């Protein structure tokens, strides 16, 4: 299927049940206040990190971009603002996150196609996109290797994947400060304004995520060529740029 065809936000699907940490059900439950907490917990850096993600993509006219795990749509909106007339598709399994993205999209009069779906089974035919972006989403995929294979499949040969992800705190003073913030402030503030469970999961999933070099190896073993690993804000966040080879 090509972007723009078939299932939309209203379609049914076989989504995770039971609110497993990181599942769409969990995100359904924290959509209220999600953007506000993103700004607070990242100390105002999250939108800057998304802008860096957009800037790394140098897209041709009419390029097709998939923003996977689009959530409330901040990255899809940034892509649409910068890449105007090009096709931007935002996909996420959480109906509430998508509803929030839709409200923002309508307010901004942006042209984004929002689709309910799962990264492990993308509803697109091979080579449908020139670029795929994922911001703070890869950590939540229950079968990361499968999702990465799906991403590679829907990328056109020569197409780019840009992943923005929080990193396990590095060694040294900046790592110590990040660790203190992620282990203490994040669950505390999260519990005050949203769900304690969800924001404890954030801390646990960040610490459990592979270090940048290890995640780069996962990308390479999927058949993607890693072009760049850029650490942002003292290594709190990392941007990975990879390409599906032409062969
Ligand atoms: C931390 S939010 C990130 C949202 C957005 N990209 C951002 O920059 O704020 C993670 C998102 O991953 C989504 N997600 C969880 N499991 C997923 C899956 N299997 N496939 C696609 N998205 C998934 C959640 O519904 C949630 O919206």
Image (spheres, rainbow, N blue to C red):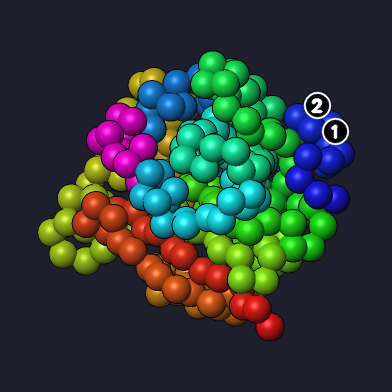
Query: Can you see residue 20?
Result: no
* Residue at the (68%, 83%) spot, across then down: 247
154 vs 44, left or right, is right
232 vs 133, left or right, is left
* Residue at the (41%, 57%) spot, across then down: 56
Query: Residue 73, percent across and down?
Result: 54, 33
Residue 42 belongs to the span the image colors magenta: yes
When the figure is inspected, residue 119 is found, relative to residue 42, above or below; the finding is below
Q: Which residue is mark 1?
A: 12
89 vs 42, left or right, is right
Task: State the residue lying farthest toward the bottom.
Answer: 247
Q: Which residues are magenta?
A: 39-49
Numbered label attached to residue 86: none
Query: Residue 146, percent across and down?
Result: 70, 64
Q: Main secondary structure of the magenta part?
A: helix
> Nearer the observer, disc 2 or disc 1?
2
Query: Residue 63, percent across and down?
Result: 62, 52
Give neighbour class at mark 1: few <14, some 14-19, many 20+ (Cα, 10 Å).
few
Q: Which residue is mark 2?
A: 10
Nearer to us in this view, 120 or 172: 120
Query: Can you see residue 52?
Result: yes
119 vs 164, left or right, is right
């Amino acid at each position: 299927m090509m972007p723009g065809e078939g299932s939309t936000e209203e379609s049914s699907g076989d989504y995770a049940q039971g609110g497993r940490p990181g599942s769409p059900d969990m995100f359904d439950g924290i959509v209220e206040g999600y953007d506000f907490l993103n700004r607070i917990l990242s100390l105002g850096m999250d939108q800057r990190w998304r802008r860096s993600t957009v800037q790394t993509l140098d897209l041709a006219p009419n390029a097709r971009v998939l923003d996977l795990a689009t959530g409330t749509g901040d990255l899809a909106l940034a892509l649409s603002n910068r890449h105007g007339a090009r096709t931007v598709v935002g996909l996420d399994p959480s109906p509430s996150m998508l509803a929030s993205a839709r409200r923002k999209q309508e307010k901004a009069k942006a042209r984004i196609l929002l689709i309910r779906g799962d990264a492990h089974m993308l509803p697109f035919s091979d080579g449908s996109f020139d670029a795929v972006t994922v911001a703070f989403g890869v950590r939540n995929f229950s079968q990361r290797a499968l999702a990465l294979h799906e991403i590679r499949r829907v990328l056109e040969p020569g197409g780019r994947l840009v992943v923005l992800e929080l990193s396990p705190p590095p060694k040294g003073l900046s790592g110590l400060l990040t660790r203190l913030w992620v282990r203490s402030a994040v669950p505390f503030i999260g519990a005050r304004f949203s769900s304690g469970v969800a924001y404890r999961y954030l801390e646990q999933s960040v610490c459990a995520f592979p270090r940048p070099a290890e995640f780069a190896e996962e990308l390479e073993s999927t058949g993607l060529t890693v072009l760049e690993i850029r650490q942002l804000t003292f290594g709190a966040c990392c941007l990975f740029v990879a390409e599906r080879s032409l062969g």
